[in-house]
Image (cartoon, helix red, strand yellow):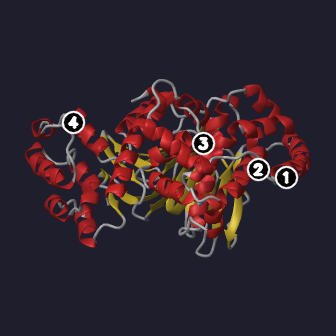
Amino acid sequence: METTISLIGFRNHGQSRDPSLVEKAKAGDRAAFSQLYDQYARMVHGILLARVPRSEVDDLMQDVFLLAWRRVRELRDPQAFGGWLASIARNQATDYIRREPKWAELDEGMLRQNPAVPEAMAVLDTIRGLGEAYRETLVLRLVEGMTGPEIAERTGLTPDSVRVNLHRGMKLLREKLEGRSAS
Amino acid sequence: MSDYLWDKSGEPDGEIQKLETLLAPLKYRGKRTSRVPLAIAASLFLALAGGWMALHREAPGWQVSTLAGNPGVTRLAKGEFLQTDAQSRAKLELTSVGTVEVEPNTRIGVVTIRPDQQRLELKSGKIHASIWAPPGQFSVNTPSALTVDLGCAYTLEVSDEGVGLVRVTAGWVAFESDGTESFIPATAMCKTRPGRGPGIPVYVDAPESLQTAVDRFDVSGILVLARPRDAMTVWHLLRRVPASRRGDVYDALAQLMKIPASVSRDHVINGDAKSIDALWDALDLGSIGWWRQWKSRL
């Protein structure tokens, strides 16, 4: 009897906005890679922020793009750049969580810098507490300001998937926030 | 759903706008002092060296690095096997696919290595896989199962008797064998046995008594011992028990979770696939539609 074990990832091939940039980056063009950095920075930032402490996001972003730069030559389908980069970001976050299973999110410096941040962090924590499928999409939409079509285009999720995740995630978030304010 | 949530068009949703304003301080603020340019410059040299090496490229293979002891090889190509001893650990890496850490006393080899398909064979022992390849591209044969990875992190071990055990750390997992499916979310585990196929998944933090009941396929025990969180485990019984017991399973589920209005007891007892799928979706562990979508591609 053959059993198939499948790991369900919410991924598809991300459509690169400009495949020629990826081709140039593959050929070692730093300027092209820099443009890709600018195009995808919000996505990578959001994916990481949905999973790891805010204080670690900038460093991990650098790690993600360094890894992407080192490996981009071996990316066979330039159209898949976005989904591929999103996967690297998720993997870096997973590695971080494995190394640092417990982390505290709020620090005093952050509180002093912006009194609105504690409330924002509380909402972010609530989003992080939602299911795997929802937190990333909601952070990209509500924090990074990306639209649903943008999220789909960059991450490789299908538009239908993003729509469902936004809809369900927002419903869950409203319920959680209402429950929090009620208590 | 309002268009505003989807693409910011249409009538703005006041609550969403409030959240956007509140969360704005957390958004990406543009490039800061970056290690990337310096590293890119350094990498150029490596890229040139890599270009030279590409001219002398060997057959494709997984890079093997030593984590402990002496695994004995630095590269694993199609048809080759790596056997770690009691002191050795190794890491297999294939760019754009992922990494596989190999524990001591493990035998693993390469079955297929193509641009669109990479398959390993785990004869015995334990591996930890972190895969970022596109869905369905990476798979692992075991004596009792084929593991097809759709992009997650998990540990897979195979005993000398060929019993497979997967523990999921990120994403979720589906087992399938001859139409029998098991879905294993993160922090859950599931066995698959030669001749019997996939078992029932259970959370690793479930009471030992429940884990034992799952292991023995003690249906009554599972129904009695399940916590609300274990509705995931109970759900799997719907497709494993005879129709005569499906009502008991449904009744137990109704105690553990909110049954969607679209699902009726009679439909479930009659084995209606849509109703059973809707119950899974109501667990909020991820839409079963994902699985159906991926499965159709396998």
Residue that mark 1 sits on: B39
What is the secondary structure assignment of the residue under circle 1? helix
- Looking at the rendered structure, whether the residues under marks 4 and 1 are on a common chain is answered as yes
Q: Is residue B122 left or right of residue B272?
A: right
Q: Which is closer to the viewer, label 3 or label 1?
A: 3
- Looking at the rendered structure, whether the residues under marks 2 and 1 are on a common chain is answered as no
> Which chain contains the residue that carries disc 2?
A
Residue that mark 3 sits on: A144
Residue that mark 4 sits on: B275
| Tag 1: amino acid | Ala
Kindly identify the residue that appears in the image at 21 percent across and 50 percent down.
Answer: B237
Q: Are marks 2 and 1 in contact (CB under 8 Å)?
A: yes
Rounded to the nearest whole Å, what is the CA distance between mark 2 and mark 4?
47 Å
Kindly identify the residue that appears in the image at 62 percent across and 50 percent down.
Answer: B25
Q: Which residue appears farthest toward the left when viewing the image?
A: B244
Residue that mark 2 sits on: A66
Q: Which is closer to the viewer, label 3 or label 2?
A: 3
